[in-house]
Image (cartoon, grey):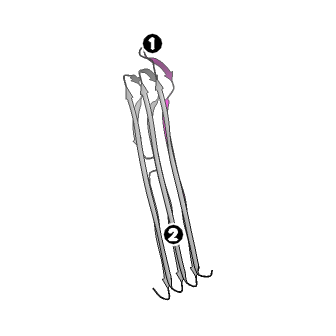
Amino acid sequence: SGKFAGMGAGVANVIRSSAEASVIGKPGFGGALDVDAGGLNVLALKESDIYSLAGGFAFSSKASIGAAVGYNEITTTTRARIEDARVRVDEAIHVDGLSTSGIYGGAIAGAGAGTFALGGSVVINRIGQSVDAGVSASTLTADSLRVNAGDSDDTRTADIWALSGNIAGAGKV
């Protein structure tokens, strides 16, 4: 445009979530919970992803300023448990707390002018995961027992792919 051009772009993404799966008795009310079954699967699964892009460019014959900002955050809590229970199964007992998260984002800015050009970009990413699986105060009878707290994808637990870039140019400074 004419003498001055300005551009700004901003992105904010926040995911805060939890997943819980449980078999829980009431010890203070007559004893443990009784479960008789062929098999038992206690699964808490949480998968969260953010895809984000902020960008823009400003051009002027005299002066221009361009900026792009991104902010991403994922905080998850995943819990699978058996507590205060008597469980009798013919096959297997599986207690799995599983979680994966990913942030894929970027911020790109540009500015161009005849006299003065200023551009900048910022990306901030954060992933926080709490994953728990367990058995407590319980009696279990089964062919096999698996207690697993970890990632729900064999190839990743938490991924962040981020890009921040800027280009600015002026004829004079």
- Against 42, residue 34 (above or below) is above
**Main SS of the magenta segment?**
strand
Q: Quadrant of residue 95?
A: top left
Q: In which quarter of the image is the N terminus?
A: bottom right
Tell me the residue at 54%/62% (across/down).
10
Where does residue 123 sit, x and y in percent of width and height? 46, 63
Tell me the residue at 51%/69% (across/down).
67
- Against 124, residue 129 (above or below) is above
Where does residue 119 sit, x and y in percent of width and height? 48, 74
Where does residue 129 sit, x and y in percent of width and height? 42, 46
Q: Which residue in the structure is indicated by mark 1?
A: 29
**What is the three-letter code of the residue carrying label 1?**
Phe
- Residue 157 showing in the rendered view: no
- Against 24, residue 65 (above or below) is below
Where does residue 65 sit, x and y in percent of width and height? 52, 74
- Bin the neighbour count of mark 1 within 10 Å (Cα to Cα): few under 14, some 14-19, many 20 and up: few
Tell me the residue at 38%/29% (across/down).
135
Q: Which of 3 and 170 is in front in this view?
A: 3
Provide the residue span drawn in magenta.
25-53
Q: Quadrant of residue 31?
A: top left
Tag shown at residue 138: none
Q: Nearer the viewer, residue 38 or 72?
A: 72
- Residue 39 showing in the rendered view: yes
Determine whether the residue tagged by mark 1 lies in a helix, strand or loop.
Answer: loop
Q: Which residue in the structure is indicated by mark 2?
A: 67
Total marks shown come to: 2
Could you tell me how far apart the alpha carbons at marks 1 and 2 are, in whole angstroms? 61 Å
Q: In which quarter of the image is the C terminus?
A: bottom left
**What is the three-letter code of the residue carrying label 2?**
Ala
Tell me which numbered mark, 1 or 2, is placed earlier along the sequence.
1
> In the orientation shown, which residue stands out farthest toward the right?
1
Determine whether the residue tagged by mark 2 lies in a helix, strand or loop.
Answer: strand
